[in-house]
Image: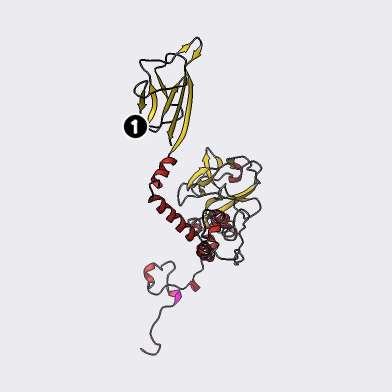
Amino acid sequence: MAGTRGIARFRGEQLNQKIMRNHHFDEAHKISETYLNINFHNHREVLEDTKVDVFVQANNKTVAGVAQLDVSADVGSRAVSTGINVEGVVLTEKVQIRAAGTDTPIGDVDADVVYGRLEEAAGVYTLKFYSLVSGVEQPYTFPAGVGNIDYRFVVRTNLSVFPVDSIIKGGAGFVEGATDAKAYMNLIQLMKDVYGASGTLDNDGNANLPLAIQDQINKEVQDRLASDQAAKADLAAAAGAGLVGVVTDPNYAGLTVQAVLTELALRQKSAGDTSTGLADRITKLETEDEEEVYEAVGGETQYLLAKGRAKDKTVRLAINGQLQTPTVNFDYIKNASGEITGFNFAPETLNVTNGVPDVLFVQYKKVM
């Protein structure tokens, strides 16, 4: 009867129980999820093995006048994370700080952000405060009278207990480098340098200066060039001499600066061409008449000029009203330049006779 029933096939009941093995299935044709009944809710180990870092926030902490806080109560019984796959408090991350109830960062004296770092010892957690000084991390102490703060630290946990609001609360406003940018990037300092102490920052996209800084620089350059040119024109004008005060001097007739300079040059040239010319005038200007009076105390063999150096061949020396002769009654004392600095009477001396001292009187041209 072959062919009357078709090809023979297995029925399900013909297979014995518990005899299906991996080698019965084709690797190229996987079993569809439609035919599988897996309760993934009962398989959380994959979530527990996946670690994530989240923020934990504590609010309204008093920090006036302090450099650190004991925050063991805020951290609770959490252990310290000792590795990338170990859950607990992450001590290597900065603790972010804001003014209590706001998203406003707190800056130090030059607007660098104040932040914190957690330290743990024997289960005690201490929050210490820092800021950057010349690019180097330095301890920071809050000034007395400062307001309270909120802060948040980092905890390493896993996806099976990942807080439902972590992305919204952990990834929004309270983030260093975002709303924190005004202080973190020193924009406050830059703004004060540009606008002065009364300047403020805003974000409306509109210029606060009536002229851009580059336009101000360009205008200043043009104004300086115009001012210099105007000054030159004024000096060259008919009233130019008046700008330097010469117009009131009866020794000059010129009205412009150039005319006055020309007159002065002609006078100097004319003076230099005469026997009593410029050289003699300069010599007179370089010396000044001087005189000195000295009462002897007795026994002096010399006298040094007290008011300056004397020009050679200009000295008149008298003792008790009697004119003295150089090289006869005394010798000059001179310096290396040949200028007279005093007089030598040795072996003679100035005397005091019956209580009356010798009086020395000198007149000379003082070297200026």
Q: Position of residue 250 (x, y in %)?
A: 55, 54
Q: Is residue 41 left or right of residue 308?
A: right
Q: Position of residue 96 (x, y in %)?
A: 56, 51
Q: Residue at x 49, y 24 (%)?
A: 293
134 part of magenta stretch: no
Q: Is residue 157 above or below residue 70?
A: below
| Residue at which label 1 appears | 338
Q: Is residue 362 above or below residue 276?
A: above
Q: Is residue 297 above or below residue 276?
A: above
Q: Is residue 214 left or right of residue 367?
A: right
11 part of magenta stretch: yes
Categorize mark 1 by other alpha carbons within 10 Å: few (<14), some (14-19), many (20+): few
- The boundaries of the magenta stretch are 1-13
Q: Is residue 237 above or below residue 60?
A: below
Residue nearest the viewer, comparing 122 with 6:
122
**Predominant secondary structure, magenta span:** loop
